[in-house]
Every structure is written in C-alpha cells, then in structure tokens.
Image (spheres, rainbow, N blue to C red):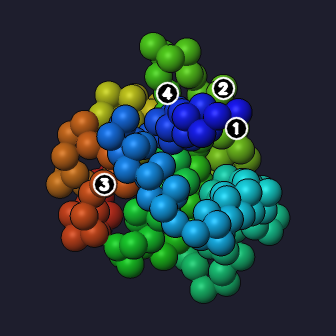
Amino acid sequence: MTADHSLQILLDELGRLPGIGPKSAQRIAYYLLESDVEEARRLADAILSVKEQVHFCSRCFNYATDDECAICEDSTRDTTRICVVGEPRDVTAIERTGSYHGLYHVLGGVISPMDKIGPEQLHVRELLARLGTEDIHEVIIATNPNIEGETTASYLARTIKPLGIEVSRLASGLPVGGDLEYADELTLGRAIEARRML
C-alpha cells in the first residue's frame, strides 16, 4: 500500500464524519501525519474504547457504561419528572443548563414519515412502560422545534395525556428549525423554565 493510498483512505474516512468537509479532513489528516505515533495511538485507543464500553442505558436509552446511566443512578434526581428528548446529545445540552434535575427518556430519533420513522421505530413503548411503573407526575417534551419534533411532541401529548400525567413542552425561545445541541445555555435554560402545558 503506497503512502498516497494510505492517506486517501484516511481522508475518505475522516470525510465521512458529520461536519467534516474535504478541507477539514485534509487538515486533520496532515495534523495526524505530523504528530507522533503515541498521540495517534491515544486517539485510536479513545475511539475504540468508547465503541467497546459505551452503550445505551437500559432504562432511559442515554449513553451509559454500566447497565444504567449516571443520571438514572443518581438518587438526588427528581424522579417525578421525565424529560423526553430525541437523541442522547440532547441530554447533554439540557444538563449543561443546570436548570433541570429530573430524569430523561431518549426516543432514539423523532417521527419522520419521509424517512419512514414512526413511533414503532422509537423508544415510545418503553416510555409508556416507564409511565406505568414509575411515579411520574410530568413529562416534559424537549424535541427540536422543527416539523418532525413538533409532530413527535403532538403524538406523545395525545398518547400520554389520557394517562392523567401532565405533559409540557419547552417554551419558545429556541429558534424554529434549530437543534438543541447548538442552543446556548441561557436560551435553553429559559426554555426549560418557561415550558408550556400541551
């Protein structure tokens, strides 16, 4: 295998990462070429380690290294509230605000008929099972404020309200069409505190 071929394989793999275009892939590849072997090995080991050790929490589907994630295992959390998000990265975004101290449930996506994703492809059944077995008083729906997120929020509200559990939605303040993971802490914190009932 030639050096050019090895470099092209690296460029191709880096280019497959989200948000990494050809120029960024090239910058990263040349950085790795100029770094020492130990630095490259640490990066490779970190990638392999996270793939081998991190999985989904058996309770909420957040990322975890044990059976349950650190949030589910935290006895100081408010166990009467569940914040429903689309992806594990949304948990991180909300946790950064310091405004919410309840539990989470990660759907693993949102309802998107165009992509053939309905409630059956998400962790909705598991959420309903939790609502039947845990003492939950409020479900806060924190899906992104776009068409798919709103569709998911409406579906969950219609499904959960008959169970006699309060259902709320993050307040406006988040940009429509935006993603939770890119919102600043102040905006996201205010949205959590000013959530509205559905």
Q: Position of residue 122 (x, y in %)?
A: 62, 34
Q: Position of residue 143 (x, y in %)?
A: 41, 45
Which of marks 1 and 2 precedes in the sequence?
Answer: 2
Asked whether residue 123 appears in the rendered view, the answer is yes
Tag nearer the camera, 4 or 1: 4
Q: Residue most toward the front?
A: 2
Q: How many marks?
A: 4
Q: Do residues under tags 2 and 1 come within 8 Å of each other at their CB atoms?
A: yes
Q: Residues within 10 Å of mark 3 (few under 14, many from 20)?
A: few
The image quadrant that residue 7 belongs to is top right
Q: Which residue is mark 3?
A: 182
Tag nearer the camera, 4 or 3: 3
Q: Which residue is mark 2?
A: 120
Q: Which residue is mark 4?
A: 111
Q: Residues within 10 Å of mark 2 (few under 14, many from 20)?
A: few
Q: Nearer the viewer, residue 143 or 23?
A: 23
Q: Do residues under tags 1 and 3 come within 8 Å of each other at their CB atoms?
A: no
Point out the image quarter for the C terminus: top left
Q: Nearer the viewer, residue 192 or 18?
A: 18
Which of marks 3 and 2 precedes in the sequence?
Answer: 2
Residue 136 placement, left or right of 174: right
Residue displayed at 42% across by 43% down: 25
Which of marks 2 and 4 precedes in the sequence?
Answer: 4
Mark 4 falls on what kind of element? Answer: loop
Q: Residues within 10 Å of mark 4 (few under 14, many from 20)?
A: many
Q: Mark 3 belongs to which amino acid?
A: Tyr
